[in-house]
Image (cartoon, rainbow, N blue to C red):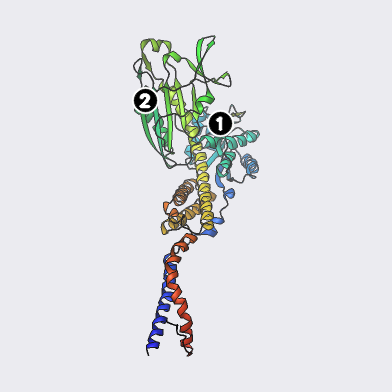
Amino acid sequence: MAEANRMWASASFVGVLIIIGLPLWWKTTEVYRVALPYDEINAFDTDSHFITTELVVLANDEKTAAKMAEDIAKAFEQSDIIKLKIRHQKLSDSLRQTLDMVADEQEALEEVAAAFDVTGHNTFHVVQRRHLFQNVWIGGERVAFFRDLKASETLIRALSSWVLQPLLLEGARSLTADDARRVRLPSEQHLDLLMTVVHPRPQKMKVVFDAPAVLEDYVGSFVDELSYLHNVTLKSQWLHLTEFDFQAKQVLSPSGPQWWVSVEADGDEEWELDGRGLGTIRLAAYILPCDVTPLVLHDRGSRVEAAVPAFMSPKWGGVVLLNPSCEECSKGQYVVPVNMLMGTFISQLRKLLGITDKVNIPEAYLLPLDSVSPRLWELDSLLRLRTLEQVTSAQRSLKSLAKLLGEIPNIVITDKVGSYIQSAVQHAHEARVYCERGSLVEAHEHARSANAAAETAFTEPSLLALLYFPDDQKYAIYIPLFLPIMFPVILSLKNLILWFKGKPVVKEKTD
């Protein structure tokens, strides 16, 4: 009986240790990894993204409308990033007569706007107007006027270079950075715009400039138009007794001595203006001391011809150098030329946010900006750019994260990280669907949400919880703990097997 009790006790101990203890230890020490949609992530193809854009051709007769629509469609049929959905129709007799009668393009534009809805995002109207001084006229609305069918080539160039910009969109979904991408800031929902007035010698000159009011009046109305792209917070500050080392050289010119400074040297300068966050745009106005004025910029030995000396630092901001006149220096008071300064800042801000300069096209007239607000079709172009940029960034981040999680099985994937990844995948899918439909605003909202969720998942600190605790370290810690217990269990297994088979148990010899 005693022998049986001893064997049953050993069997119970072995059962508890092997059947319950080992699985429980294995389960409690495993790395928690929530299921992820790896197949959907691996199926992402960033090079296949495209945006559908609606184009409406309105002409004096059906034949002209159809032919112009055909020419435009043929010109863009090879584009894999802009898919045009073209509609064409004949102008009504009353509207055609009105367009022929009005002398000013702005009046003609108002007539078109009254007859058609030209306020929708991602829809552009091409309207025939015979009384034009050029083949093509484009203003600030989503409307272009063309003279006749002979203007088709000019119109196509204007649509490609100014309005739709497929080459710029190619750069948004590519890993190769073009010139515009090197300058513009990354896509950020929240931006701080910091305008700094640097006055190195306040004891020698009084400066008249209401920085907060001017910033709100000029830049405030500009950023209001971008509210669906960025939430911009305007800030301003003054820096006194701060001098920048320009390493200027004095040269003689027909108008008298001048101070020359290199664009290359200043463009790479580190400006200590605070606001170091990635989502900060810095605009600096530097009031030059009178002993280095007038100061001009030169590029490789040649003077930079500009109304005001200014330069930009890519993805950082812009700097404007203000030259007080001899009369202002003698009076000891300088009134900042607000229109000139803020006009330069707006020009720099446009490039930093992604609105490119427009090249000249023969026989095409682009109406100059008459306000600080961007053109409506420029906003559409920027919306396309940011949408593709963010959905592409989200998908690349997800693919990199999925590859990393697949290669390193010891990374913990919590439910929180899993929800971020699932959300990013869903929003990226929705963004692509809306892009293909041509619903630009909705596509951008989903693209921004996808990018934010993907970035949050990629930088989640919990991913590093067990990154430096691989399996060999786990075994090195637990084996010394369990090995002394396992030796007696393993040695007793032989006697248990013999006892269950009814064979005599081998007794250990004792001295």
- Image spot of residue 345 (x, y percent): 45, 28
Q: Secondary structure at mark 2?
A: strand
Write down the residue under mark 1: 358
Q: Amino acid at mark 1?
A: Lys
Q: Alpha-carbon neighbours of circle 2 within 10 Å: few (<14), some, or many (≥20)? A: some
Q: Position of residue 25 (x, y in %)?
A: 42, 68
Residue 224 occupies which quadrant of the picture? top left
Residue at 40 percent of width and 10 percent of height? 327
Residue 239, numbered label:
2
Q: Residue at x 62, y 35 (%)?
A: 157
Most foreground residue, 287 or 127? 287
Query: Label 2 amino acid?
Result: Leu
To which quarter of the image does residue 302 belong?
A: top right
Which label lies toward us, 2 or 1? 2
Where in the figure is residue 292, as x and y percent of width and height? 45, 15
* Residue at 49 percent of width and 53 percent of height: 430
Q: Which of 329/130 is in front?
A: 329
Count how many numbered circles sit on residues in the image.
2
- For image coordinates 48% across by 58% down, the residue present is 470
The local crowd at label 1, few if under 14, some if 14 to 19, many if 20 or more residues have their Cα within 10 Å, is few
Quarter that holds the C terminus: bottom left
| Nearest the eye: 359 or 365 | 359
For residue 119, above or below residue 101: below
Which circle marks residue 84 in the picture?
none
Q: CA distance from mark 2 to mark 1?
A: 35 Å
Instruction: Give the mark, 2 or 1, whose residue is nearer the N terminus.
Output: 2
Where 486 sits versus 42, above or below?
below
Q: Is residue 34 visible?
A: no
